[in-house]
Amino acid sequence: MQATRLTLICHARTVAQKLARFPLDEPLEMDWQALRLSRCNQFKGAPRLVCGPELRTRQTAGLFGSAPQIVDALKDCDFGRWGGERIGDLQKTEAQTLQHWLDDPASAPHGGESLVQLGERVGAWLTTLQSTPGHIVAVTHPFVIRAALTQVLQGGASNLIDVEPLSAVELRFHDRWRLRFPGIDPEELL
């Protein structure tokens, strides 16, 4: 049976990221329309392109293909009333609450989704992919990528993983998930 290859790509940068704000459904900072389909040949073959429902993931997916499938499991963590808030402001006004959220992944003091709930959602999605052979390119959010890596690595320190805009990580499933770091073809360097 062919393995499942999953490439997780973080959406391109937004103004909220630049300003260290919890996200809303904001657009990309870059002129994504000018770069539309600019990365569509990045992967060999014809991978299945999926993305979260937010504007920033749909716009980023437009760099890789023209008709991404929207997958609700790839939506960003629900930050509740913290959506749009600057992290620095919360450190001043709700320092203890913010620290509690950072220390306890089961907490959701903002009234949204806890990191445990996010991990369960992403873990359930990964399980559905185990019987889906072929290559899937998923454009999503830093928190979703952290949750996927935490599920695969079976660890609980997702806040120790930094995910930069337009970064990619590859997972493979053949009897179990594995984190894969693809190399560079020396021919491409010439």
Image (tube, grey):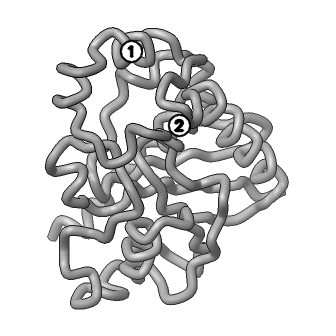
Tag 2 residue: 179
Farthest front residue in view: 93
Front residue of 42/87: it is 87
Mark identifier at residue 185: none
Front residue of 110/69: it is 110
Q: Nearer the viewer, mark 1 or mark 2?
A: 1
Circle 1 — which element? helix
Amino acid type shown at disc 2: Leu
Task: Tell me which residue sits at (80%, 51%) in the image.
Answer: 128
Amino acid type shown at disc 1: Thr
Q: Quadrant of the C terminus?
A: bottom left
Disc 1: CA contacts within 10 A as few (<14), some (14-19) or many (>=20) = some
Question: Residue 67: percent from the left, percent from the top?
Answer: 56, 86
Task: Count every numbered label the image shows and give the total.
Answer: 2
Mark identifier at residue 97: 1
Q: In which quarter of the image is the N terminus?
A: bottom right
Task: Tell me which residue sits at (23%, 49%) in the image.
Answer: 17
Give the quarter of the image for residue 12. bottom left
Disc 2: CA contacts within 10 A as few (<14), some (14-19) or many (>=20) = some
